[in-house]
Amino acid sequence: MGMSEGSHGGTKNIMDALISKKNHSTNTRPHFPAISFNHRDLLKQPSGRVKQKKFINAVNYIHFMGGSLFVNGVDRASGENYFLRVSPEPCWGAEVTCRFPEGSSFDMQNLTIENLIIDDGKSITCMPLKVCEITNEHFSAQISTKGFVFSERQSRRFRSQTVQVRVKQGVHTAAGTLEDFNSNGFRIVLDEDSGYRYDPSQDIEVELYKENMIIYSGRCRLVRVGNDPGSVVVVPFEDQRIVYKRRKLRNPRLNLIPTPKIVFAHPFSNQQVAYEISDITTSGFSVYEGVDRSLLIPGLIIHDVDILLAGSMKMSCNVQVVYSQKSRRNIRRFGIAIIDMDMSTYSKLFDILSNADDVHANFTSSISMDSLWEFFFESGFIYPKKYASLSRHKERFKKTYEVLYQKGREIFGYFTYQRNGVIYGHASIIKAYHRTWMIHHLAARPLEKKRTGLFVLKHILHYFDGLYRMPAVGMDYMIFYFRPENSFPDYFFGGFCRKLNNPKACSMDRFAHLICQKNHGGALPDGWTVRSASAHDIEELTQWYDEISGGLMIKAFCFGPGDSQGESVEEMYARAGLKRKYSLAKISYGDQTKAIVLIDESDAGANLSDLLNSIKVFVPNSRGVPWNILKKAICEIAGEAYEGEEFPVLIYPVSYADQESIPYDKAYNLWALDVRYGDDYSEHLKAKAKFSVIKFGIGYLKKKFLKS
């Protein structure tokens, strides 16, 4: 059955008649496998011929696959015509043997068999027979030297397996099953004979499910309600699905050699399917397929797709078909979006694509830790004062970094810009909180007078461009700490925040940073207490922060209600052999909350500035909160959380530190992005990164000049 609107006008195919109550009736005798057929004129409208040898090969294929075919015969007693489903035996020559279904009580010997019929989904093949033997269990017959092909379809039809359907039009809804499909549409059998309720002049919403997962959803056109009112045929609109926001500056699409492939079990039929990929990015790819055999439909969601690359590398993902375009005669191009992929797999794919585009770019390739440490010192990322603070724990830092780079694939991603094993640029991200990732490092040094920082930034942008869309990665927010005087991140990150001017999308908040000593604490004065923070305390903190900033910081720290659903960060780090947890405490005087404390705990070196192994203090009301008392409370908390004598403290807002004349050594801007605005951020940075070194320098000088 052709699934186009014109398929039900003009020549009608045999199997349409087979399922139509108007054209047949099922014999009511028990176990009777035959369907009466009263339109023999349809057998006189062939559209082609088939040779005996080809027909025999088709019969043997059906036997090999455990399938069935039909015979057409006449009941000599009643003169009525029937179709019967039969199972073929292996066919070695011009004689074929077929078995009737077990348990049939119909007198098969009273049947004159005329034709053997194969429906391959695209056409009906009819071969005349001359019966040699017939019993109630089987028959044998001579095959004619030629047969006939009827009602060839534009697109092959495929049988569906265990796909549930829900249709809706206005107030009418119904459930059913998908019986068969092709690229032009679906034939649906409704659970109730309710097809007559639906108006062909109105669109119909169709949702398809398998194992409780949605695999298709879209508007369709109702082209036919069968004479059986429980059967309908619908045709999807060929509209393009908007999975991701359109961009002005897209990641480069690459044509890889050798050509990668995708392999999957089709969600409608369970049939194994393979396509060659034409071009690919981390966001998706395109394939080509002939119109007559197409299994792809815009809107189709496919789970567990394997991308196969050279060297037997296999990467799994979930995808959705987003468009179908005519390419050339009888060939269509299908655009397919990657809608989910885990962190490790995404990084592997990006490594292949970025390395194909730039030989110096590396994402998951093995890295020399000695070369990495040399780069950190040579580039100035580890400067003398920073090294002074970490040198006492250098062996622990080395161990933590080895684990991160070798085992932390689901919580850590890194990029290096290398030539012959020497690192010239490095950037990394780490899962900091339940739904928040942190830009971990961003450093570069010149490579033959090139500003490698821009190359690093370009690749990080391309990497981030697809990463934040993957649900498996678990990214709602991206954060980045940087010093206000650092011009590079202020230009590329701070500049976007100021330009967007929407703190609910992107915000910056400033902390004062200092190093405290545990032995500077002591007993708290009477009336002062330290307790775990409650949901009410979090709510009050959020209200205060919204009033003074209105940004994303509190949300990005993920300690609100519902922010800890699913696997915890602590469990994910533990799987890699690392420590990570965070909790909230409150410092009170009597029944008044004076400060809220975020206690971040991790292995030494998880962040070189220990920003994930520090105390962050929020002071909602600076009046009546003396620093000497607050410091005692902080030291009490640190005594239980940290092993060493020193620990970092970040204070918010900075105005409290200034008010109390706290001698902090530096300030940090906490930049936070809601990844729902990731497309806007990506477009902004890609536009910035297109600047030449000269333009970057001019823009930077103008900025400095205007400030002065």
Image (cartoon, rainbow, N blue to C red):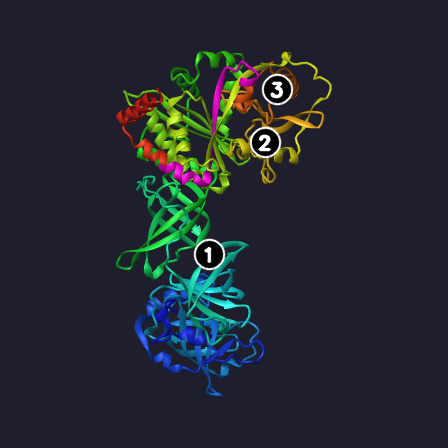
- Specify the segment rendered in magenta: 658-683
Residue 71 vertical position relative to residue 381 in the rendered view, above or below: below
Residue at 39% across, 39% down = 680
Figure quadrant of residue 64: bottom left
Query: Is residue 674 shown in magenta?
Result: yes
Q: Indicate the amino acid at tag 3.
A: Tyr
Figure quadrant of residue 579: top right
Whichever of callouts 3 and 2 sits on the residue coming sooner in the sequence is: 2
Residue identified by numbered label 1: 216
Q: Residues within 10 Å of mark 3 (few under 14, many from 20)?
A: many
Q: Indicate the amino acid at tag 1.
A: Tyr
Percent of width and height locating residue 129 = 39, 77
What's the distance in space between the residues labelled 1 and 3, CA to CA?
51 Å
Quadrant (top left, top right, bottom left, bottom right) of the N terminus: bottom left
| In this rendering, position of residue 572 left or right of residue 249 | right
Residue identified by numbered label 3: 642
